[in-house]
Structures are given as structure tokens and as C-alpha cells.
Image (cartoon, rainbow, N blue to C red):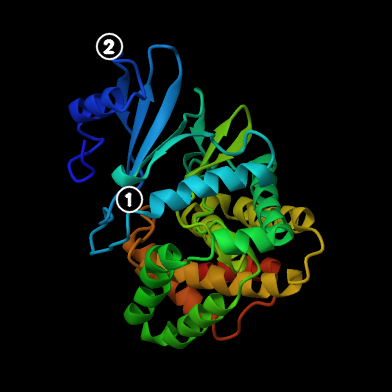
């Protein structure tokens, strides 16, 4: 089946594709379920008659957001490479194994996480903030960044291309936000420039609670299409922005999310070890947290759980903090919440 015609959300076409490509038996009829929540891929759960279950992903050239957002669907090949390499760096069971990659159709299949599992973002938004999960989150990132540094000669070459990071992060987050908020443009443009010039380690690029499933109390990391060799501080800030935005949104759980932000970073530093760029990573991580906190309000991919009042308040808090940037993650968490509560 030609790659132009395959749409894995067309279940009849998907069945034909899987049979004709020999991925399943000629008479086998799996159960298909469309998975929702992502904007950059089609995703289908395939439950096979032999009891095995896969998740199929197909990269989209135009993302499913309200403004035009384009990205080369060949990033599916980058995700497959990320799955293979990340599995070598993180605790066993933290990455779903790759089943196959069909690059011409922009499709990959990976093992589905068994049921029952929960999405960590959903748990956090319900106020279920567990220290053990937060510490695992930090440990996962520390393992990725430490391993990326230790194997930098190989990984810097394999993940040298940062075009997907540019089209899916730098442009739609920072560059677009700079156009929406001129008061932050200088800060964001400096941040982009430093990010592009810094190359320390393997960067996940989408290190978010949305991309984590919890199974048997273990965190399993998904969605690796933005992975590249670059500035690890982006991952720190990206993750911090998600934790602090939820602390903003969930008034009665703000203290828990401030503790979570600090526990995440402590666990990260412990797992990172003694890399030579450890100190600058915290400073740059704070900058990226502020950039992401702003971008998730006025960028191309705003957080859906923040209402307009909350987005406006978060923007004001960030504009205040970039004038006198906090010097540590702990200061950032405290000062951000203080700015939110002050206005």
C-alpha cells in the first residue's frame, strides 16, 4: 500500500496493510482502538488474537492544533532510533520496545503498556502527586542525560539533526511566543540562541507527564520524536513548566507541586552524576522553565487545562520573573507561585 494512501485511522485500510505486509496473519482480525490526546501523530491500539498488543503511530505532516503547524513526518524514524537508544540508558521497563518501523508509511509499532495503567498527567491533574513518581521522573531524565554525556561520541553523530526540535519546539514555542509577547522577545531570542549553541547530551525534547504511563507503580516514558543531541537544560525546564503550571491550576495542591518540582530536580541531580556542565544546567533549566511557562500560554500549543484568566496570570508572572531571573530551581518554584498568588 502506497504511503500517500495509508491512514491508520481507517481501520479497513489498516487491516489490509497489516495483513499484506505480513505483520499479522492473513486471516487474523485484531481489535483496533483509536488513541487520543496527541496532536502530532495518529495512534491506534492493536489488540491481537494471540493476546499481544501494539500501539501503532503514524506521524502527521500537519499537527492537529488551531494554528498551522507543520513538521516533516520522517521524524518517525527519529522516534524509532530514540526508542532503541533510550532503552539502553534508563531502568529496565521504562521504554516500550519497538516492534517495527515502516519509514515509507511514516509508521512505527511498539509494545503496548499492559492494563491496568494510568496516564501520569491525568493522575497529577486529579491531585494525585506521589513523591515516588516524581523521583522516578527525575531519575529517568538524569539517566538519559548522564548516558547521553557518557556516550556522546556516538550519540552526537546519530542524533545530530535538530530540525525536528526546531519545528516542534523552538519555533512553535519560543519563536511564536516572542511574536505574541514582545516584552519577552529579547529573553526568548537569547534563550533560542544559547540553546542552539549548546551541545552536551541527549535531549528527549518532550519530557512531560503527558508522555508517561504508570504501570505497577513504574513510570514508562513515551513519545521520542523530538530527541536530539543538544542542551539538556531544555528537558529540565520543559518538565518544570508542566509541574508548576499544574500547581498554578490546582489551587489546593500548590504546596504539593512546589515539593514535586524540588523533588524532581533533586532526583535528577543525583542520577546525573558529576558531569562538567551540571551547574550551568540548573541556571539554563530555570530559563527554559520560564520560557515554557510562557509558551504554554501564548505559543502554538497552549495548555488545555488553563483557562484564559489563568493563562493571562501566568504570562504576567513570567514577565515579572524574567526581569530578575531566579538563581535556582527551588527559588523558581517559590517565586513563581508567589507571583501567581500576588496577581
| Relative height, residue 341 to residue 64 (above, below) | below
Q: Badge 1 is on which residue?
A: 39
| Relative height, residue 94 to residue 307 (above, below) | above
* Residue 307 visible in rendering: yes
| Residue toward you, 339 or 103 | 103
| Residue toward you, 81 or 198 | 81
Please name which of the two marks, 2 or 1, marks the residue nearer to the observer. Answer: 2
Measuring from the top left, give residue 336's x and y in whole percent.
Answer: 57, 69
Measuring from the top left, give residue 161's x and y in whole percent.
Answer: 48, 65
Q: Which image quadrant is residue 43 in?
A: top left
Q: Work out whether mark 2 precedes mark 1 in sequence or the reverse, and give the earlier one.
A: 2
Measuring from the top left, give residue 126's x and y in whole percent.
Answer: 49, 40
Q: Residues within 10 Å of mark 1 (few under 14, many from 20)?
A: some
Measuring from the top left, give residue 172's x and y in whole percent.
Answer: 36, 68
Q: Write the residue at 49% across / 50% down.
A: 224
Q: Which image quadrant is residue 264 in?
A: bottom right
**Which image quadrant: the N terminus?**
top left
| Residue toward you, 162 or 41 | 162
In the image, which disc is placed on residue 27?
2
* SS state under label 2: loop
Q: Write the residue at 56% across / 80% down.
A: 194
Q: Write the residue at 47% across / 80% down.
A: 188
Q: Write the residue at 28% across / 55% down.
A: 63
| Residue toward you, 154 or 178 | 154
| Mark 2–mark 1 CB contact (< 8 Å) | no
* 86 displayed left or right of 18: right
* Residue 223 visible in rendering: no
Q: Which image quadrant is residue 103 in?
A: top left
**Residues under labels 2 and 1: Cα distance?**
33 Å
| Relative height, residue 181 to residue 80 (above, below) | below
Amino acid at each position: 500500500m502506497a504511503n500517500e494512501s495509508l491512514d491508520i485511522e481507517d481501520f479497513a485500510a489498516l487491516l489490509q496493510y497489516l495483513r499484506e505486509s505480513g505483520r499479522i496473519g492473513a486471516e487474523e482480525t485484531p481489535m483496533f482502538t483509536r488513541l487520543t490526546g496527541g496532536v502530532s501523530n495518529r495512534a491506534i491500539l492493536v489488540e491481537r488474537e494471540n493476546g499481544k498488543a501494539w500501539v501503532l503511530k503514524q506521524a502527521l505532516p500537519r499537527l492537529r492544533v488551531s494554528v498551522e503547524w507543520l513538521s516533516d513526518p520522517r521524524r518517525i524514524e527519529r522516534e524509532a532510533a530514540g526508542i532503541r537508544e533510550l532503552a539502553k540508558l534508563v531502568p529496565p521497563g521504562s521504554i516500550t520496545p519497538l516492534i517495527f518501523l515502516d519509514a515509507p508509511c511514516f509508521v512505527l509499532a511498539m509494545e503496548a503498556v499492559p492494563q491496568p495503567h494510568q496516564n501520569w498527567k491525568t493522575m497529577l491533574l486529579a491531585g494525585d502527586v506521589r513523591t515516588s513518581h516524581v523521583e522516578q521522573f527525575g531519575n529517568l531524565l538524569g539517566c538519559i542525560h548522564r548516558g547521553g554525556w557518557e556516550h556522546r561520541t556516538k550519540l552526537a553523530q546519530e542524533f545530530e539533526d535538530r530540525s525536528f526540535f526546531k519545528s516542534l519546539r523552538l519555533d512553535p514555542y519560543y519563536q511564536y511566543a516572542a511574536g505574541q509577547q514582545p516584552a519577552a522577545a529579547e529573553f526568548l531570542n537569547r534563550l533560542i540562541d544559547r540553546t542552539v549553541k549548546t551541545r552536551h547530551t541527549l535531549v528527549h525534547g518532550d519530557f512531560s507527564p503527558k508522555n508517561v504511563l504508570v504501570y505497577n507503580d513504574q513510570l514508562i516514558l513515551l513519545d521520542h520524536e523530538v530527541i536530539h543531541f543538544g542542551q539538556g537544560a531544555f528537558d529540565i525546564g520543559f518538565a518544570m513548566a508542566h509541574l508548576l503550571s499544574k500547581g498554578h491550576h490546582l489551587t489546593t495542591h500548590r504546596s504539593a507541586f512546589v515539593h514535586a518540582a524540588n523533588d524532581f530536580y533533586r532526583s535528577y541531580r543525583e542520577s546525573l552524576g558529576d558531569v562538567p556542565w551540571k551547574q550551568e544546567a540548573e541556571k539554563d533549566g530555570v530559563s527554559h522553565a520560564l520560557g515554557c511557562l510562557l509558551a504554554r500560554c501564548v505559543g502554538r500549543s497552549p495548555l488545555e487545562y488553563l483557562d484564559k484568566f489563568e493563562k493571562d496570570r501566568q504570562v504576567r508572572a513570567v514577565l515579572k520573573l524574567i526581569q530578575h531571573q531566579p538563581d535556582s530551581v527551588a527559588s523558581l518554584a517559590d517565586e513563581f507561585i508567589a507571583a501567581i498568588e500576588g496577581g
